Structures are given as C-alpha cells and as structure tokens.
Amino acid sequence: MTDYRTLRVALLGAGAVGSQVADLLLRHGDELADRAGAKLELAGIAVRNLDAKREADLPRELFTTDAETLIVGSDIVIELMGGIEPARTQVLHAIASGADVVTANKALLATHGSEVFEAADQVGAEVYYEAAAAGAIPIIRPLRDSLAGDRVVRIMGIVNGTTNYILDRMDTEGADFADVLAQAQALGYAEADPTADVEGYDAAQKAAILASLAFHTTVPLDAVHREGITSVDAAMIESARHAGYVIKLLAVCERLAAEDGGTESISVRVYPALVDRAHPLASVHGANNAVFVQAEAAGDLMFYGAGAGGVQTASAVLGDVVSAARRHIAGGVGVGESTRANLPAVPIGRVITRYQITLEVDDRPGVLATVAGILSEGRVSIATVEQTVIEADENTQTGGSARLVIGTHKAREQDLSETVERLAASGVVERVVSVLRVEGN
Amino acid sequence: MTDYRTLRVALLGAGAVGSQVADLLLRHGDELADRAGAKLELAGIAVRNLDAKREADLPRELFTTDAETLIVGSDIVIELMGGIEPARTQVLHAIASGADVVTANKALLATHGSEVFEAADQVGAEVYYEAAAAGAIPIIRPLRDSLAGDRVVRIMGIVNGTTNYILDRMDTEGADFADVLAQAQALGYAEADPTADVEGYDAAQKAAILASLAFHTTVPLDAVHREGITSVDAAMIESARHAGYVIKLLAVCERLAAEDGGTESISVRVYPALVDRAHPLASVHGANNAVFVQAEAAGDLMFYGAGAGGVQTASAVLGDVVSAARRHIAGGVGVGESTRANLPAVPIGRVITRYQITLEVDDRPGVLATVAGILSEGRVSIATVEQTVIEADENTQTGGSARLVIGTHKAREQDLSETVERLAASGVVERVVSVLRVEGN
C-alpha cells in the first residue's frame, strides 16, 4: 500500500449519522486513503454521554466528553452534534485551531452561516456541508461548481423526508394526516415531537442554504416563508388527485427579475403545493428527497435520492472529508466560495404562482358570475372552473350547495389572498374549502 | 466592480456548443467574474473555416484558424472541436503550454483519457470534463467528489438523447424505428448519419468515462460491451408495455464482488433493456438523459436533465471554466484525481441480470415442460411465464402455435445465451422472437 501522510480527524457527535461515519472511516480506511491521498486517522469521538447506546459497534477508547481538547491539533473536524450550541462554539473553535470543518448541521448554517463562513475565510479554512441540504443527494457541488457558469432561475425541492412520507401515504392510502403521522412515528420516520418536520422548519433551513448557494447571496432564515402540512387533509389530497395533482411540501427558491430600474430579488418559501402528476417531482415517493433546478442555460435538472438516514447521510459527510483531505494534501489552498451579493428577499405577498381555490357556494343562478367578478376585480385570472352539485342533507333538508374548483393563471399572492377574503365575505360563498398553490410546469 | 485579475481563455471550436460558450462568456462577463474571482477574457476562437455560419452572433475579430498560436499564453483552453484529431494534439499542446483544459470531448477521453490525464498530472494541470458524460447534467463532480467516501455499486444511465427520443416516440406512438428515426432526423434530434447514436457508440464512450470515475479505475473503450437499438421494433415495444416495462438504451456500469480469492471486477455495457415502468428511469422522456447511481452507503441517487443541446452543454462547460479560474486564483494548486486502480473489466458473458425471453412454440402437450427443462439444465431459473395461443394462418391452415413470454430470475449472460441457442435448436421452438435484459431493481 502507498505510504500516505496521516491526517487527524475529530468527530463531534455519535448519533445516527455520526456513528455511521465513524464505522465507515474505520472499516473503509484503506480505500478512503486511496481516494483522499492521505490516511484518515479517527482521533476521537466527542459525545455528551459516554455510555449512550450507539448504532454501530465502535471502540470504546475513541470516545471522549472533551470536544475542546479533541479538536486541537486535528486537520479535519466533523461536526454532527446538530442544533446551534454547543455546535457553533465548537465549529468556530475548530476553524480557529486551523482545521477544515465538515458539517451536516442545517440549523447552524441557516442561522449562523455567515459567521461560520467568515471565520473560515479569515484563516483560509474550508467548511464543507454537502449533507446539510438534502441528505445523501449531491446538490452542494452541482450548485456551487457545476452551475457556477450558469444562472439558476428556480429551485423546487422536496427536502424533508418525513413530510414526503406522510403526504405520499396520505395520497396512496387516502388516510388522514393524524393517522399517517402516528404510523410514521411508530416506524421511526417521524420524531416524537414532529414539529420541526411537519411545520416546515427543517425544510425552511434547507431552503435558506440552497437559495444562498444558487443565487450567490446571503439568505437569512427569517426571510424564508414557511408553512407546514398540518392543515392538509384527506379531502384535499383526493381533490388534488381528481384534478391530476399530488400535494408535496416544496421548498421554492426563485430569482425575480428587476422591476422599474431596481435590482433583481429572490423569493424563498416552504409550503404544501400541488404538483402535476406528470412532473418529475410527483414521482418522488416515501421518505425520498429531490431537488428540481431550473437554470437559464442548463434547462431543467433534477437530483434525487435519500434525504435522510444515518448511513445515507454519512456518505455525503465522508465525500466532504475526502475533499477536505485532498485539499490538505494539495497544499492548503482551496477553492474559494464565489462572491456573495446581497439580493433582497421578497415577502410571500409578492410571490407569483398559480392557485387552486376550492369553494362551497350557494347553488343558484348568478353565483358563478359573482365569484368570477370578484376574481376579476382582484386581478386573479381564471384558467379552469369545475362545478359540482353537493347533495342536500337528508335530515335537515338544507343544501342546494355547489362545489367550485377554480384553477387560476399566475397571480400575486397578495392579490390572491385579498381576493379570497372578499370571496369569503361575499354572501354567495358558504365556505372556502382550500386554497393551494400550483407549482411545477 | 471589484478589480479582478484577468485570465486568458482560448476557445477551440465554434459549433453548437462552442458558439454558445463564446456568447455566454461575452454576455455574462461581469457575473462570471464574480463567480470565478477573475475576469475571463475570451482571447480568441479557433475554427477551421472563418466563414462558416455560427449559431450565435460573435465578433469576427475573435476568430482565427491558428489554434496553436492562440493556445500559447492562455490560462484556460476550452476544447469543443470533438473527434480525436486534431483535438488530441491541441489538448496536449495546451497542457504542455501550462493551461488548464476544459473539454466536452467524450470520444477523446474515452480513447485517450489516460494519455491526457497523465500529461496533465506531469505538469500539475487540470482537465475538466463535466460536459463529456451527460451533457448539462452535473454528474462528474458528484461521482468524483461527493461520492468519494462511498462505494458506487452500479450506474444505469440513459446517456444518449437521440436514442431516448426515438424509443420514447416508439413507446408513446406505437411507431416503427425507421419512421421515428426519419422524424428525428427531420427535427434535428438525429444526425444524417445516425450510426454513432443508434448503434450505441456515443453511449459506450460515456459509459467508459462514467465507469472510470465511479470505480476509480481505467476503463478502455474496447472493454465496453455495445449494442444499439436498430433491432428494436414496434412489436417489442408493445410487448414490453404489456408486461409493464419500457425499453431504454442503458449504459450499465457494475462493480462485481471478488470470486474465489480474486479481485473485484467491473462490467460496463450498453444495450437496449427493459425497465420497469415504476422505475425512475422509465419516466425519462424525449431527448432527456438521466444517470441512476447506486452506492453502498448513499443508496439510490438519480441525476436528470438535458443530455445534449448547445446552450445546455455550454452551461456545464462554463461551470468547468469557473472551477479552473478559481483554481488559478487560489494559487495553482488543485484538487488531484484520486488514485486509479486497474480493476479488470469482465466480458459480457459474465454479466448477471434478469431476462425476458419471447418464443413462438408448437401448441401441443409437453412443450412447456421441454422448454422449462432446457432452461433448468442451463441454470436459468424461471420467474414468470405467460402463454398465449397464436391464431392459425387462414390461407395455409398451418398454425397451432403459441407465444411464450418467460421472465427469468438473475442469470449469467453466458448461460442465458447458450440456453437460448439450445431452445432454438430444440425442435419445439419455432422462433426466438426476442431476448431482452431486464434492468432496474
């Protein structure tokens, strides 16, 4: 075997991903050395609790609770603790100590990314984070490098496996949200506290990271519009199916052209949206993720794979470790991040997309004309209308209602929501059943 | 604007891709400078014929017929001439002159890749070729970098747009190969001489490049098994559909486990294969490409996008140009290629996959038993059988035939082909209608 230089690798965290990273580093050492051009020595694994149960069988002597000491003298520090603190402190400590950092910590990068990247720039260190945006799917290098000569126009990502699993089960089984969530929790696809996933927080963090990369700009987390999937019910799914759609939780990152001599801007948002069943994103099933990228020159691209999972995510982490090692061997000079502009993020109200509005209305002459009039006044143009009569209630003998499913042309979110309010107050609309955005065409 | 250092870029070739690269370099100069950290000055465009018609409106004074002189003093040379010579000579000249090279030339890399990469290694130059394997789809960096810490087990690629267009039209319209090919030629999706595409030569070159990267080994082009799609007819497509499959021209790159204390080996092959309609590759329509990658840790990944087209491919080329520029700015030290092992490539006969065999047999008792016996003797295990009676010919009153469609479990290609020969000679088989490999799961 070639006589390689040894690089010292410190691992922080031994959860689902961390224990797999340690296991692969130990088991595939020779092959990784060939890939990296350096022997990767796992110097230690910092954990909070030495006695916690691990998913892989790892040598006891590698474990320590003293991350601070472990970091000193390491060439590469892998941060897989998750959360903001103490991850942030340890990552900054690693950078200050002269190490390159590999992290899968989307929460940290989405909230303190600028601080971390600036600290790295000042000392010439690199921060690798392929695992932070879409698990095992290689999306960071394509956006940062392969598309660096192009202009990304739009990203639509299914970037949260738990919610895709839930929506997919609801779609295939006609089941209700609460039932599927309970199943997902039982199977380990969802956490006991599912808030981060089902309310879209996880997806929003990833959207911020993807948009930053795609548009070469800083995107603070609070610039990301976020809606979860807790309001999606079986009837909405069924209605979507009837219209040829499937409901997906999408992270949409969009570049908007300059208006009236201003600058370009971007929109970053996470919400459940209808996707045409013929669109490639519609066939992303189970807990899988996919990132659909539209670029000016390259056209449509899609990256598909496992969005989570310990060993899958470990693959992305180890790819970064090899990249960091190659950089060390090549002499410490790395590929810099491209210039970051500061494009403004627009609020959700300025987003332009298509919508599907489902209403229950009185079933009498003139109602459709009234509804159409309100839409027209609100600058919302109708693309399709489907009206069906709802059976009268046998007990109360009330009824005489109809269901209107209206597909709109592109409209501004602000106009749309004001129009829906006026519809609700119009006297002819009994109930606004749902308002969904239509993405992907 | 930031005061950037200027890098001199030479472009060789101004065909469909070259003219788009030149156009984008000129139009997006400022934005590319921000991405690259350097001003990219297009020093000149070497062409054979100064008066040829170009797809973009480019300044006349940039053109020259003297590639040799243009190359000298350039920091980055973009080779988009295609073909082996003079591309090979100019690329080696560029490397010797101290330039980094960006190329989309799959024929050159598949046949003289080792020579080119070794020449670059000797002087510390880099060769970038994102556009050579799957057009605009970023697949090189994911394989080389993102998956460097993983072990790629298998690649299945739809890497030729022309053949995918033809097969897709045959599938959706029930049309015949010759008719669709003629349409494709009329629409510009196929060349006047379609041999390179329809006989699988183009796909084989790309397969060699992908396998080299994925398995970190040298794969000579003559180690790639190659079959084209000229034998695919409407009846085969229809029969595939009936069984829930679609026919795709696949480039399959496979890592095979060591046997009996030997080393691991690989198999690289291009042929039309059945793909389950539920598989992600089945929904790759038109002239699009996709590369499906299975890795030990990462699991299943898919990369989808435009496989050809001038402006789409130009995106990949410019991404490489930006990477090369960043490397120049960072100080000339680059990310090295990982060690290349020399895994042996196995011949097609040792490939193990599933098959669908369609036979016309005598419709009399005992025939199925005979056929099953021959398969069993040949170590080919039957998974599914479907038998249908064929109407007797009204004129000749001959007939009494049946059609047998046999799906097999995994079998060795060698065993399978010998078994099919024995079936053909068995006396009960009137005709071997088709033998197709089933890929994907």
Image (cartoon, coloured by chain):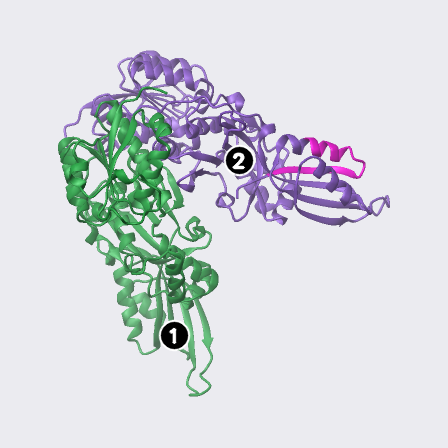
Chain colours: A purple, B green
Query: For residue A177, which quarter of the picture?
Result: top right
Residue at point 73% right, 42% down?
A372
The answer to whether the residues at label 2 and label 1 have Cβ atoms under 8 Å apart is no
**A433 inside magenta stretch:** yes
Q: Secondary structure at mark 2?
A: strand
Q: Quadrant of residue A32?
A: top left
Kindly identify the amino acid type of the residue bearing the numbered disc 2. Leu
Most foreground residue, A36 or B167: B167
Residue B31: percent from left, percent from top: 38, 28
Compared to A199, does B240 lie above or below? below
**Which residue range is magenta in the image?**
A418-437
For disc 2, the neighbor class at 10 Å (few under 14, some 14 to 19, many from 20) is many
Residue A240: x and y in percent read: 62, 45
Residue at (72, 36) in percent of width and height:
A377
- Residue B234 is labelled as none
What chain does badge 2 belong to?
A: A
User: Mark 2, mark 1: which one is toward the viewer?
Assistant: 2
Chain designation of label 1: B
Helix, strand or loop status at disc 1 = strand
- Let me know if residue A212 is in the magenta part: no
Residue A52 seen in render: yes
- The label shown at residue B360 is 1
Depth check: give the residue in front, A415 or B393. Answer: A415
Q: Which residue is mark 2?
A: A250
Left or right, residue A434 beside residue A427: left
Q: Between A112 and B289, which is closer to the camera in this rendering? A: B289
